[in-house]
Image (cartoon, helix red, strand yellow):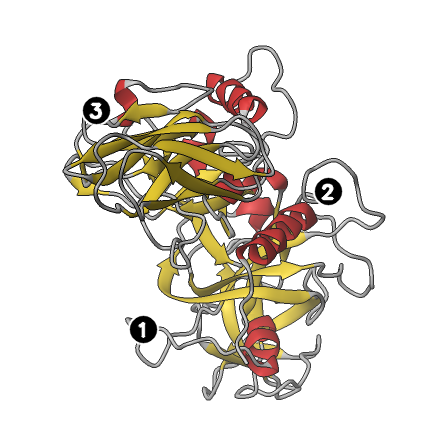
Amino acid sequence: MTAIVTKDFRLNAAKKFIGDVSNTYPEYTASPDTENRYYLFTGRGESWADDTNPDDPYDNTYSVHTDVWQRMHALKEITDTDVTFAAPRYQWISGTTYTEYDDRDDELEGKKYYVITDNNNVYICLKSGGTSTKNPDVTGVQTSGVIDYTADDGYIWKYLYTVSTDDSNKFLTSAFIPVRYIASQPAVGADTALSNQWDVEDNAVDGAIYHVKVTNGGSGYTSAPTVAIEGDGSAATATATVESGVVTKVTITNAGTGYNFARVTFTGGGGSAAAARPVIGPKGGFGADPRNDLRAHYITTNISLTYADGGGDFIVGNDFRQIGILRNPYDYGTTNVSTADTMSASYSITLDDTTGSYASDEEIEGTSSGARAIVDHYDSANGVIRYHQTDETGYEAFTTSDNIREYGTSDTGVGVDTLGNPEVEPFSGEVVFLENRTPVNRASDQIETIKLVLEF
């Protein structure tokens, strides 16, 4: 028994994720009864066994739940402006051979059947002619019809959209291009890229046939046979070209509309056995929804961590080695889904003076309770230690009668003034993405832009 998960299923899952993050359904038209919250988190200050080769994360309860929560530093909410659909990036480069779109190509995904140009215009290849030598930007933005270069390098292109300035700055990478669907006409004064894309979507022709592939040239033709296109659509017409008695190509003269299925037949011309098949585009037509055209079942995120973000929730002066996405964590001590912009995930000890010195990632202990923990950060100006506990330290609670010192020393330590809890309820919510990285050190004047790609 063989089976597949279809591209439509994968794209639908990506749409639902976007809808969940933005608290709307996939097409951004209706709000659900319960709003969901997604957060980027950072954590794990301790080194890997080999810090140049992070440990692999495993999809088990301990790896993506227990261990992640124990070492988590802080969280920042992901909003609808932080996410978009994406597809692999294929740059148009003269002399490159691109694959033509084919509705029967079972390996189309992963092939270069669309391009982005240096002007950030995105085109889909409807017909290939060997190496591409004429940049589709020569014609450029054309919100209806196709760009026909068959007389030049043999290619036919369809303009889909231009990556907007905002999306280019935030989401465009060397490996992925952002993909958007415009659900309603952009407001007056909107980015020209959005207005052009809306026109492309509005002008898309469902069931048009822009290309016919010759599967058998036949033989004995003394003139071009008549081409007929039959199916459940209408008005598609084409002509045949004969060379040395063989049908070498079929040229569309009218793309027609409304075809879900069609067949091509040849009559006349004195020969026999020529055969061809039409290539029918996706539902709605090319450009109606570029997420479908480009199989954009990837989600890319862009979240910036600015300095100590959230008034100090994000640690500076220490590094992190884990990032991830958490869905619907609770406020500490409640079952209420958090709505905070940022949250600290560390426990804290406020000392009764600032004479001590506690290094990030060192182990501390309480002289009275015997509790042990690992330092996430020490705020020497205010005498505040942020810390976490693991299986190695044990989970004994600190008390206000403790003195805090480096574990294993005989120092007197510094007394405890107050004990603090994290802002987020530990072990709440669902970790939906986890990535282990080489260490990223944070400084007080530093901004990190964290870009993640999720494949559905």
Q: In the rendered image, which residue does mark 1 sit on?
A: 51
Can you name the residue that lies furthest to the right here? 33
Residue 343 appears in which quarter of the rendering? bottom right
Q: Distance between the residues labelled 2 and 1?
A: 40 Å
What residue is rendered at 61% in x and 88% in y? 370
Instruction: Characterize the local packing of mark 2: few (<14), some (14-19) or many (20 or more) Cα atoms within 10 angstroms.
Output: many
Counting residues from the start of the chain, the first of labels 3 and 2 encountered is 2
Q: In the rendered image, which residue does mark 2 sit on?
A: 24
Q: Distance between the residues labelled 3 and 1?
A: 56 Å
Q: Is residue 328 left or right of residue 52?
A: right
Q: In the rendered image, which residue does mark 3 sit on?
A: 151
What residue is rendered at 49% in x and 19% in y? 196
Name the disc covering residue 117, or none.
none
Which quadrant is home to the N terminus? bottom right
- Name which residue type carries label 1: Asp
- Name which residue type carries label 2: Thr
- Name which residue type carries label 3: Ala
Circle 1 sits in a helix, a strand or a loop, which is it? loop
